[in-house]
Amino acid sequence: MTSANTPAIGKRVWHLISIGVSVLILAIAAFTLSRLLREIEMGKVVAEVQATPVRTLLTAACFVAISYAVLTCYDLFALRTIGRKTVPYRVAAFAGFTAYTIGHNLGATVLTAGAIRFRIYSAWGLGLIDVGKIAFVTGLTFWLGNGFVLGTGMVFVPTAASAINHLPAWVNRVIGISSLVLIAAYLCWLLPRPRVIGPSKARIVLPDVRLTLVQIAIGILDVSAAATVMYTLLPAQPAINFPPFLVIFATALLLGFLSHAPGSLGVIEAAMLIGLTQFAKEELLASLLTFRALYFMLPLSIAAVLLSARELTLLAKAAHRRNQSERPSDRRRPIRFPRTEASSAVSDKQRGSMP
């Protein structure tokens, strides 16, 4: 075995591990949901959904808007990191919103989100390598933010994570401390000088410590706003404090991300039903369905409409330019009469009389 083949084999092994983890999470989620939903009366679930106060829905919708507004900072931060500072915020926000929303809900996020980003950013001179860099930086932002939230939560409220993973509280606390230590070590690694990673054609200068703290803050705000949407929709009783709920929600969100299921469908629901056993199943499922409608389906519909409108506008402009180029000129060409001997003689005489 040559050293040149080692990276390819390692990449293949990690790919297989990723697939195995995704399949395992999906299988556990499917089994758990099928077991939990047997005792649920769907009539009560529908009634609970219909009984949700309008004020609660509007409050939750406001936090959905805040969450997706923070989400647009992922792409903006990534563009500034790779040196593409000429791309304005409106373009970064549009690309980030549509790419994440459509890509995450359809599955195969790397391909679908990458294709949407390339379609939008190519108009600003970005290539496939740039889109790959953006995907890396946005992913790093997600993991840093989620790692900090989960790490801190597992340190202070380890029993909340135990409700889902059924590990002893001390084990979850050790996991939380390890997560925070890794983030601290990464920050220390960035201190001496700018760090560059990747091959020559796809090199990325990592953000310095100050910008990495901004990066972590973006991830924290994103997860916290999304958690607040679900927290707003929870049944009024029994009451639950936000910190333990945030740990349960972040764990469910992370499991959904690792599963690669379209929209984390079924995975988030299963994890939340396991972690929040103090609520009546029908009431909690009604909250989860409302959350999915507001946080996943509504933004997906908006993103699809916006992206379709953009494509139709581009097609209309292209057709207009094509029609303009094919249209004959409106200028009238001067009429030329054939020259005769008489006219030639008169013309020569006129030229001869001129000074």
Image (cartoon, rainbow, N blue to C red):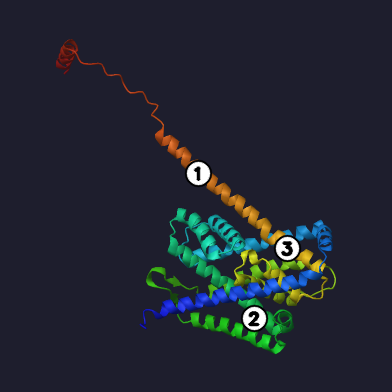
The answer to whether residue 6 is left or right of residue 155 is: left
Q: Residue furthest top?
A: 342
**Residue 308 sits above or below residue 85 on the image:** above
Q: Which part of the image, by quadrant, shows the C terminus?
A: top left
Q: In the rendered image, which quarter is residue 343 located in? A: top left
Residue at left 80%, top 74%? 240
**Residue 169 sits above or below residue 266 on the image:** below
Is residue 321 among what the camera can see?
yes
Q: Position of residue 76 (x, y in %)?
A: 54, 63
Give the labeled residue for mark 1: 315
Q: Earlier in the sequence, mark 2 or mark 3?
A: 2
Residue at left 66%, top 71%? 253
* Image mark for residue 291: 3
Q: Which part of the image, by quadrant, shows the N terminus?
A: bottom left
**What's under tag 2, amino acid-wise?**
Gly
Q: Secondary structure at mark 1?
A: helix
* Image mark for residue 151: 2
Q: Earlier in the sequence, mark 1 or mark 3?
A: 3
